[in-house]
Amino acid sequence: MGRGARALFAGPRAAYDDAHSLITTSPASMRSARSLPALVSLRAFEAAARRMSFSLAAQELFVTQSAISHHIQRLEAELGVALFERLTRAVALTAAGQAYYERVHAAFELLRLGTDEVRAPETVRQTLRVGLLASFATRWLAPRLAAFAAAHPDIDLQLQPDIGLADVAGGEVDVAIRYGRGVWPGVRARLIMAERLSVVCSPALIAGRKRPRTPQDLLRFPLLASHARHPFEWDAWARHHGVDLGGVRPVRLHDYNIVVEAALAGQGMAMGRHRLIAAQLASGALVEALPNAALEAPRIGWWFVTPRGALGEAAQRFHAWLAQAATERGDTH
């Protein structure tokens, strides 16, 4: 290896040794390099194997699930070996897939390390992986991303939306924004903003019908809820107003974005998270079914979740920006 190549990887010894074993000018290595699979297929495989989901890999890489599946099938055909077992509602790595993933993941990490080392100091960017609900990403965070980028141009936010909880303690993401009461094991949660909850619907749902006058009257309509083990918002609201939900089964939908869309279409009553539906309330597309029956829930809200221990600089700055954005005009209760 020439001096230039050695200087390029003048980082940790382990990284240099790995790079030295990968970079050579021998004819055999040049033949091997020419036969490498397409980078886009390797990226699709690495993301799908790391997240154990084609759909989550598609969200991360901003492509369709069918594109992920196509790239992995192409990779399997090129390698002549199955990398995944296709189960009924999930995927699992084969033994060959697990071994290949470990190599591919390490190679991507090595590329990232080498890129950071060679990049000019003034242009070094920090990547912050953020796990969050798709509804929060689209309805609250996305309209504010340009403001964050302008204030912190050296931080790349890598959003990983999902309806489940990203594993913060295990390192799946660096930080997360979660919705709930702030009680999760193995992590630290800081409240960003509390929610204001009230039952909302499309004006068309109650037009020409006897308008609900009491919380109990709302049970005449379908109740919409996002998919979860337990619809705690409806339970908290019902306890607050003395309503018995024992015989009521909410219509379960995949995530809160679909709940909002169903409510807009007049399909039922939704528990309105005012932080996320402010625009629809302001335009009149959604209205409070009982204007004076809101639930102010100081412990139900949006939380900044991190591993226990000290926060990195990028995480600290992102948290400070979120806290400030939550108090700005137009985003208060």
Image (cartoon, rainbow, N blue to C red):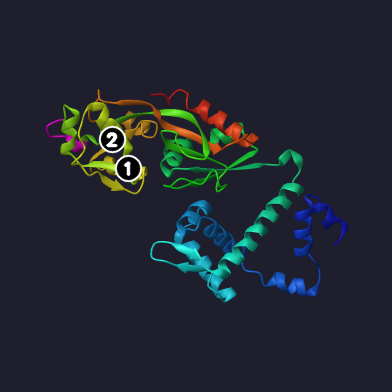
Q: Is residue 188 left or right of residue 251?
A: right
In the displayed orientation, state which residue is furthest to the front.
Answer: 185
Residue 285 visible at all: no
CB under 8 Å between callouts 2 and 1? yes
C-alpha separation, residue under disc 2 versus residue under disc 1 = 9 Å
Residues packed near mark 2 inside 10 Å, few (<14), some (14 to 19) or many (20 plus): some
Residue displayed at 48% across by 29% down? 192
Q: Amino acid at mark 1?
A: His
Q: Give how far across and how far down residue 42 sits, in percent.
A: 59, 63
Which residue in the structure is indicated by mark 1? Answer: 230
Q: Is 124 left or right of 84, judged from the image as shown?
A: right
| Relative height, residue 43 to residue 236 (above, below) | below
Q: Main secondary structure of the magenta part?
A: loop
- State whether residue 73 appears in this view: yes
Q: Magenta residues?
A: 204-211
Is residue 124 shown above or below 303? below
